Amino acid sequence: KEKVEITKEQQALVKVVVEAYNRHQIPQDVAKKLLQDQYSAEENFLLLTEMATSQVQVLVEFTKNIPGFLSLDREDQIALLKGSAVEAMFLRSAQVFSKKMPNGHTEVLEERIRKSGISEEFMTPMFNFYKSIGELHMVEEEQALLTTITILTPDRPYVKDQQAVERLQETILDVLRKMCVLQHPQDPQYFARLLGRLTELRTLSHYHAEMLTSWRVNDHKFTPLLCEIWDVQ
Ligand SMILES: N#Cc1ccccc1NC(=O)[C@H](C1CCCCC1)n1c(-c2ccc(Cl)cc2)nc2cc(F)c(F)cc21
């Protein structure tokens, strides 16, 4: 039985990434807002575009703390941000949805999201993903590293030096694999299941443009940043 241990530099890397991940979270807690009041489809659409816009800004700040990211080719940095922003947003939403809440709150939150204006056809894939993330009971280190792995996906469109991105991603994959073995000794498949969620995440993210344009509102207004990042307008 091989002895798995996290090296000093891997511990330092995790610390930097987790601190940055926690520091760069959206200030206003959207779940709390949704639990407080029922909003109209228009208000929900506006809330989503505000959340998504600020999330992209937060993502840019977060990536600056990923060791090695700023040493990548600058155009590749943009390609990675553009390619992962939607997935990072759904992953963040799933983590918010999976947070432990007082009895009945998750059901209210789900109901508010079901009635927020999103078309019916997207509910099942979206909530299946959220629940599959919830079942993993990820600790915050795993959440931060999984988001980092999503950002460091080498085969995003327009990435020129894929090897450089692959090397960075492998560094994170290696420490996440060790953490999973140490954190979930009873479940040797845990790391594989964690990575399997990224496939589900990519599939869900294919729907994002349609989910936005089919939102039950008359006028779908997007911020310039969202037009840039999301394939809309
Ligand atoms: N959370 C969060 C979050 C953080 C950063 C950026 C966006 C976020 N998501 C959001 O704000 C939306 C809200 C926006 C208002 C209307 C209801 C959905 N959201 C989404 C959702 C994101 C996109 C698309 Cl197309 C459909 C749904 N799944 C959520 C799950 C949650 F549990 C949750 F609380 C919020 C959630």
Image (cartoon, rainbow, N blue to C red):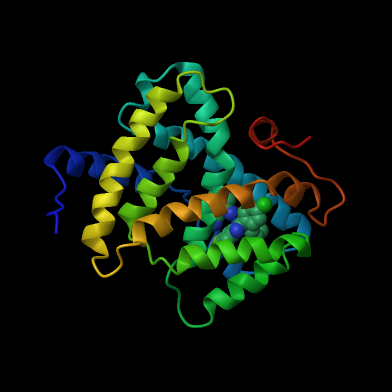
Residue at x-position 56% and y-position 34%: 83
Q: Position of residue 31 (x, y in %)?
A: 54, 63
Which of the pair 110/186 is nearer the observer?
Answer: 186
Q: Is residue 213 visible?
A: yes
Q: Is residue 112 above or below residue 220?
A: below
Dividing the image into 4 quarters, which one contains the C terminus?
Answer: top right
Q: Position of residue 99 (x, y in %)?
A: 44, 67
Residue at x-position 34% and y-position 54%: 142
Q: Is residue 233 above or below residue 24?
A: above
- Say how many tags the image has: 0
Question: Residue 216, located in which quarter of the rendered image?
Answer: bottom right
What residue occupies the far right of the structure in this picture? 218
User: Splitting the image into four quadrants, where does ligand 1 fall?
Assistant: bottom right
Dividing the image into 4 quarters, which one contains the N terminus?
Answer: bottom left
Q: Is residue 186 above or below residue 12?
A: below
Q: Is residue 218 above or below residue 165?
A: below
Along the horizontal axis of the image, is 23 left or right of 83? Answer: left
Residue at x-position 51% and y-position 36%: 57
Q: Is residue 47 visible?
A: no
Which of the pair 22/91 is nearer the observer?
Answer: 91
What residue occupies the far bottom of the structure in this picture? 103
Q: Position of residue 40 (x, y in %)?
A: 76, 63
Along the horizontal axis of the image, is 203 left or right of 139? Answer: right
Which of the pair 158/111 is nearer the observer?
Answer: 158
Q: Position of residue 193 (x, y in %)?
A: 42, 59
